[in-house]
């Protein structure tokens, strides 16, 4: 990690976005990145809820044993096997046996959505989360994740599209909250022109984030370019000054 880039962004973020939350980052590693190791979980937990600590400045290292949610294990690559009841859990359930979340119309539709899920290369590795200002020169983040309100999202969205011809420089994928900030942005990171992912629409994850907050995930390769042109964009105009008044 280039510390100068880290500090440059912090300065620019403070200038144009005030005291709004800095983003968090993640990467897979054989080590712990000097982050606190999350203990083996014997009860169900939601990774998105745990990330509230990271947003406050605590660095965390997750392993396959740290994550007890079956869906999260799949979207982080720690377990590709799907529980036979998952197709019912995500659809209409099984009376008296499995609660149905009713996110999909039928188990068959669930099957199709899971058929081509790409496994992330996480086997034997830790999933390291750090807030941007906690990164050191030894860290190499794969994805930068913002949790932000609509006005801030409007700025991030416009920044992400500033140098793009393709109107779909930002996309949204149907997935659990962890899929929208980990799985799909990670798959974008090595592409020639990686896309940003707008997410956190998952009703199950919503209780773990503040109201009026969505996620905006940017592959690091793309994020570095955005930092480079921030001061040539709408951020220096009176238009953005008016928007800033709504959250600063």
Image: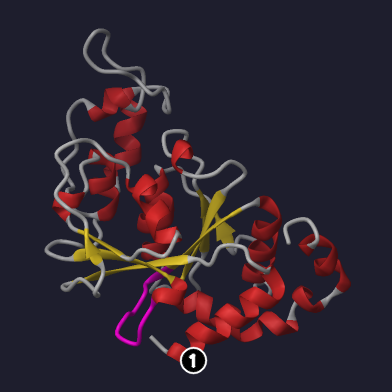
Q: Position of residue 238 (x, y in %)?
A: 88, 72
Instruction: Single out the residue that lies furthest toward the top.
Output: 96
Q: Position of residue 61 (x, y in %)?
A: 24, 63
Instruction: Single out the residue that lies furthest toward the right.
Output: 238
Judge whether 229 appears above or below 131 on screen: below
Q: Is residue 101 left or right of residue 214?
A: left
Quadrant in the rendering for residue 11: bottom right
Q: Is residue 66 magenta?
A: no
Q: Number of numbered discs present? A: 1
Q: Main secondary structure of the magenta part?
A: loop
* Placement of the C terminus among the 4 image quadrants: bottom right
Judge whether 247 appears above or below 29 on screen: above
* Placement of the N terminus among the 4 image quadrants: bottom left
Q: Is residue 141 magenta?
A: yes
Q: Position of residue 67 (x, y in %)?
A: 22, 47
Quadrant in the rendering for residue 155: bottom right
Q: Secondary structure at mark 1?
A: helix
Quadrant in the rendering for residue 13: bottom right
Q: Is residue 61 left or right of residue 132?
A: left
Residue 166 shows in the view: no
Residue to which mark 1 is pinned: 4
Judge whether 52 appears above or below 188 on screen: above
Residue at image x 53%, y 50%? 172
Residue at image x 51%, y 75%? 222
Residue at image x 69%, y 77%? 15
Q: Position of residue 152 (x, y in %)?
A: 67, 59
**Badge 1: residue crowd in 10 Å (few <14, some 14–19, many ≥20):** few
Q: Is residue 19 left or right of residue 87?
A: right
Q: Is residue 133 left or right of residue 229?
A: left
Residue at image x 46%, y 75%? 133
- Magenta residues span 135-143
């Amino acid at each position: 990690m280039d510390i100068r880039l880290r500090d440059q962004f912090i300065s620019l973020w403070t200038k144009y976005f005030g005291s709004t939350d800095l983003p968090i980052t993640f990467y897979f590693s054989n080590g712990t990145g000097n982050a606190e190791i999350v203990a083996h979980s014997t009860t169900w937990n939601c990774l998105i809820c745990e990330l509230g600590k990271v947003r406050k400045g605590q660095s965390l290292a997750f392993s396959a044993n740290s994550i007890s949610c079956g869906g999260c294990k799949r979207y982080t690559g720690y377990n590709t096997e799907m529980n036979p009841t998952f197709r019912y859990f995500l659809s209409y359930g099984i009376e008296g046996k499995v609660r149905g979340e009713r996110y999909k119309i039928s188990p068959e539709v669930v099957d199709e959505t899971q058929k081509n899920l790409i496994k992330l290369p996480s086997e034997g590795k830790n999933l390291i989360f750090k807030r941007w200002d906690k990164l050191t020169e030894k860290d190499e983040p794969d994805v930068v994740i913002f949790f932000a309100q609509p006005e801030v999202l409007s700025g991030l969205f416009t920044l992400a599209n500033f140098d793009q011809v393709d109107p779909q420089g930002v996309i949204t994928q149907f997935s659990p909250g962890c899929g929208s900030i980990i799985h799909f942005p990670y798959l974008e990171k090595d592409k020639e022109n990686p896309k940003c992912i707008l997410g956190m629409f998952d009703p199950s994850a919503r209780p773990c984030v503040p109201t009026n907050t969505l996620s905006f995930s940017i592959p690091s390769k793309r994020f570095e370019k955005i930092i480079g042109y921030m001061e040539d964009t709408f951020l220096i105009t009176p238009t953005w000054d008016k928007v800033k008044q709504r959250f600063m």
